[in-house]
Image (tube, rainbow, N blue to C red):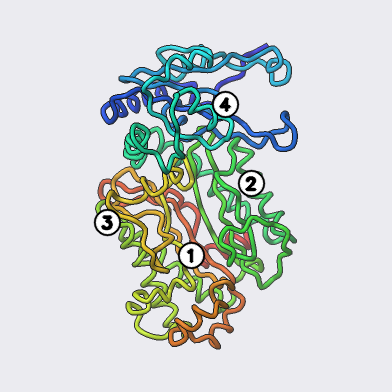
Amino acid sequence: MQIQDLPPSAACLPLAETLKQRRHQLTALIDVPVVLWSGRSSARNFPANIYPFRTSSHFLYFAGVPLENAAIRLEKGRLELFKDDPTPADLLWHGVTSTRDEIAAAIGADAAFPLIALMSRTSGAATLSVQDPATRQQQPRLLDRPVASAHQAQGLDGALAKAIAHMRLCHDAAGLAEIRAAAAVTVEAHIAGMAATRLAHREAQIRAAMEGVILAHNMTTAYSSIVTVHGEVLHNNQYHHPLQPGDLLLADVGAEAESGWASDVTRTWPVSGKFSPTQRDLYDVVLAAHDRCIEQLRPGVEYQDLHLLAAQTLAEGLVSLGILRGQPDQLVARDAHALFFPHGIGHLLGLDVHDMEDLGDLAGYETGRSRSDRFGLCYLRLNRPLRPGMVVTIEPGFYQVPALLNDPERRATYQDCVNWEHLTKFADVRGIRIENDVLVTDTGCEVLTAALPTHADAIEALISR
């Protein structure tokens, strides 16, 4: 019987060298031992029937391979792996898999031990809390001290969180290669979704076509797919709605590579294959905001300024269409645009689709900055100057969210800004979002998902083809 292969990225020497470089970089930022847990699976309705397992991203960044119920200890550039070898029951049900020593060799670990040996190796170590409850309960027992949630980490753990956030903000060549691989599959998946639209009757069929491409590449989705004709529901994870000829379909679907690195792309297209005049007008307004942001994206640019540029562009477009009244800059100052664009322009992208948001705003917000309480800024996930090596999303949108537009207080606040009667002429637009993944380069930016068209004519052509 052959031993099952490690994931492809784990089996090559360059991975071990990359992990070594990351360990030495961490040593330069924090001078105490670090213990990171991978986490373990959670049962659905009985122990053997589990939810899909996802290794902790902080563990993945330094261990390189997705492992369950494992830990690593890092100190002065040295990596120790703690993991039990498969039991006879594991071999019976899951087949022969890589041993602890084989995994250690693949990732360049200096030593490998059974998991129980970790009990004597945690003294004075910093760590970060993981998501699954079983491991989260184990951490304080082994460390003999409380362990706060990652976004509340203080002391040694807080110093570790800052060090890891600093490292993961800008991606190395290995990380970027994985993001590119995920992005390429995502582009293919969206093209498959557009192609499936003409014969589909329900949202679920388009979702199946898109996720089928991702699964065929032995990847998974980086988040719960949004494939819906109700794009006004920002995180809509229902797929039962029928497709009608006048509908717009919003698909926010991204692949995650075997190594855990993510992509995140949204396109909006007409079910009939042809935008209506009102749909095309609003689509072009959103596209103008998207394009202007990417034109300005380069090192040193404040991400919040890109968000405000998108808001300004949307306000200008909505004034030109007669939906908003007034001067665009004054409308943005009053947050009137947020009635139709309530979220931020995007977020960090890496090993998490909203990268490092388990650390709260530590990674997303520059030191000394905190979230605004303004209606038009409070959901901004990233507020810092851009640096080479960052990957961010740019994703402006237009939505008619009933909870916002029908709220009596907001209608009173913006009664002079919105032509409510004229807005009814755009009733065939529930939600539009256009999203790409963008790498900040030394001199500008590179759209990693540029192979997927954004212009309305090109999207119509893809559907018809």
- From the image, state whether disc 3 or disc 2 is nearer to you: 3
- Residue beneath disc 1: 455
Quadrant for the N terminus, please.
top right
Residue closer to the observer: 5 or 160: 160
Q: Check disc 2 and report the residue beneath it.
A: 211
Give the Cα separation between the discs numbered 4 and 3: 39 Å
Label 2: state its secondary structure. Answer: helix
* Secondary structure category for the residue under label 3: loop
Query: Amino acid under label 2?
Result: Glu
Q: Tell me the number on the disc at residue 68.
A: 4
Q: Earlier in the sequence, mark 3 or mark 2?
A: 2
| Horizontal and vertical percent position of residue 441 | 30, 47
Q: Secondary structure at mark 4?
A: loop
Marked residue nearer the N-terminal end (2 or 1): 2
In the picture, the quarter occupied by the C terminus is bottom right
Q: Is residue 21 above or below residue 80?
A: below
Image quadrant assignment for residue 252: bottom right
Q: Label 1 is placed on what type of residue?
A: His
Q: Is residue 144 left or right of residue 227?
A: left
Structural distance between the alpha carbons of marks 1 and 3:
25 Å
Q: Is residue 193 above or below residue 30?
A: below
Q: Is residue 195 above or below residue 351?
A: below
Instruction: Give the distance between the C-alpha atoms of the residues marked 1 and 4, in whole angstroms.
Output: 43 Å
Residue ID at (52%, 67%): 457
* Mark sitting earlier along the chain (4/2): 4
Q: CA distance from mark 4 to mark 2?
A: 24 Å
Name the N-terminal-most of marks 4 and 3. 4
Neighbourhood count class around disc 1 (C-alpha, 10 Å): few under 14, some 14–19, many 20 upward: few
Viewer-nearest of discs 2 and 1: 2
